Amino acid sequence: MTESVTGRIHSTENLGTVDGPGVRFIVFMQGCKMRCQFCHNPDTWKIGGGREVTTDEILEEALRYKSYWGEDGGITISGGEPLLQLDFIIDLFKKAKKHGIHTTVDTCGKPFTFDEPFFSKFNEMLKYTDLFLFDIKHIDQQGHKELTMHTNDNILEMAKYLSDIGQPVWIRHVLVPQRTDYDEYLIRLDNFIKELKNVDKVEVLPYHTMGLFKWKDLGIDYPLKGIDPPTQERVKNAQELLHTADYNKYKEKRAVK
């Protein structure tokens, strides 16, 4: 029996197709300090909640589906906020790599800091991480604080750090009417992304209300009442302003396999 780190997860998804390349086994970690107004998984917020598991248990569960992943798929760690449980990710990904599994971290970057011990653990995790799905919630600091209750200084620092070391990322941005869907903000975000050297893909994710029932079940007042998802026209506008069609490295990497 190998040593196995324990973590707390919310749930798993066996055959995910939107959280990284190919077909993915997704682990939704429990716990998040952000309070995004559009969050569709507020039931993952509580730190210390969820189910306690070991990395061996999760890897064994994931390997049952390995035959469905094809050449592109693998394991994605999502949340909640996965970077709050770095020890768990390091141990799981280290073991996953021994099986030749592609590994992805889906994060908003909020826990990032150059302070120790976080920074050393973060770099250790990078050794076993193939890709980041990096969710930039809002490019404007005040706008970010209003939307998530936290500023974005360290999040943008993390984006620059990953660029400096050449860690591949897919940038994701949730388009929320009356919050992020303003041309000024989208142009500023586009200018920021252009400065990064490691972006393989940029995705616009239209805000939706599919998680609204969870807010009601938890008895939490929903802050986006009366705000509908963006129109197709506004989604297209955001895609154009962010030049999403220009980021095709993920296709090139798939083609050379």
Image (tube, grey):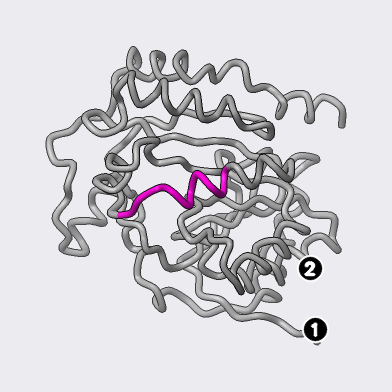
Q: Amino acid at mark 2?
A: Lys
The residue singled out by tag 2 in the image is 95
Residue 75 in the figure: left or right of residue 221: right
Residue 29 in the figure: left or right of residue 232: right
Q: Main secondary structure of the magenta part?
A: helix
Residue found 79% across the figure and 30% down from its top: 253
* Picture coordinates of residue 156, whole percent (x, y): 50, 44
Residue found 17% across the figure and 47% down from its top: 223
Residue 176 in the figure: left or right of residue 106: left
Residue 32 in the figure: left or right of residue 212: right
Range shown magenta: 150-159
Q: Please tell me which residue lies in front, 63 or 206.
A: 206
* Picture coordinates of residue 51, whole percent (x, y): 47, 76
Residue found 65% across the figure and 63% down from its top: 122
Image quadrant assignment for residue 96: bottom right
Above-or-below relation of 34 to 189: below
